[in-house]
Amino acid sequence: MEYNSVNKYLKNKYGHKLYKVAIDGGFTCPNRDGKIDKRGCIFCSAKGSGDFCEDRFVSITDQIENGKKRVEGKNKDGKFIAYFQAFTNTYAPIDQLREKYYEAVNHPDVSIISIATRPDCLSDEVVELLKEINKIKPVWVELGLQTINELVAMYIRRGYTLDVYDEAIKKLKDAGIEIIVHVILGLPYENMEDMLNTVKYVAGYRDGELKKEFMANGIKLQLLHVLEGTDLAKDYLDGKFQTLELDEYVRIVVECLKVIPEEMVVHRITGDGDKKILIAPKWSGDKWTVLNKLNKAIKEAER
């Protein structure tokens, strides 16, 4: 079974691979500053999912330069995606957003700007700014949906309802912005059907029909990691749920890929948790074993 991987997509569009530089723009999150909550999402690390980002206390330009050095030995073409990853990267005064985005977009080695955010942090003013930047270089917006199960969404303290996500999709599509949606596989109290329902929803399925006006351009399938210092870790250590075994995860990913339309780009089929704070699943720390098992299972599967 073949799927439309991000590497394949980028090589077809740009002729070469693009490496991501993970940027910390110095932002916070409405789930952290008290607007919605002060505790963050239940799974989110102290660094706001930016554990592999560059130093937030240096400029955007310096972060890009530092990120370039990390991969200079393998990045023959020298072009990058500036990935605003940590916390909520549209949650700041518009002048501050404009300054940071333009610093990234004006870097000569940056080909794409990718901005991780929440569907409830996309005001009309922000979307207009994204549209403006998109005329200079392509902008990707990465939305953290995680699940469409509203009870599980409440448990993980996502902080918004599904209709907010639908409205964000509409606004971004109308603005011509490419959308990538994050889905977590293995959330507590979810089964295979729940996970597949979420993937189908991201793919644009509504009431059993594929409606392309709801289809995201891309999807990230992320394994649930239990990290030290999170409320999720407390529940895990109290025995309230179990994480997925490797074979389970491989089987779930294969089933998810079967329902993803061929034109959708799959940006991730697993993910890394910082090994210094990773509690479970420990097998996820062996990235190459995981990827080898996934790729073998995908090749053997039929759509």
Image (spheres, rainbow, N blue to C red):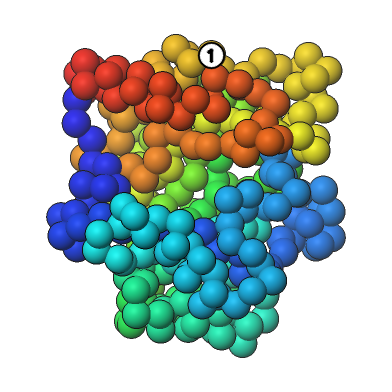
> Is 153 placed above or below 196 here?
below
| Quarter occupied by the N terminus | top left
Left or right: 58 with respect to 212? Answer: right
Depth check: give the residue in front, 205 or 216.
216
Q: Which quadrant of the figure has residue 5?
A: top left
> Is 63 placed above or below 220 here?
below
Q: Residue furthest front?
A: 73
Label count reads 1
Task: Characterize the local packing of mark 1: few (<14), some (14-19) or many (20 or more) Cα atoms within 10 angstroms.
Answer: few
> Is 301 placed above or below 274 here?
above
Let me know if residue 286 appears in the view.
yes
Q: Amino acid at mark 1?
A: Glu
Q: Read off the residue under disc 1.
A: 245
Let me know if residue 19 appears in the view.
no
Q: Residue at x 67, y 31 (%)?
A: 278
Depth check: give the residue in front, 98 or 123.
98
Left or right: 137 with respect to 83? Answer: left
Q: Residue at x 54, y 74 (%)?
A: 62
Q: Residue at x 66, y 67 (%)?
A: 56
| Quarter occupied by the C terminus | top left
Q: Which quadrant of the figure has residue 190?
A: top right
Residue 257 location (% of width, % of height): 31, 30
Left or right: 21 with respect to 145? Answer: left
Residue 94 location (% of width, % of height): 61, 83
Label 1, secondary structure: give it: loop
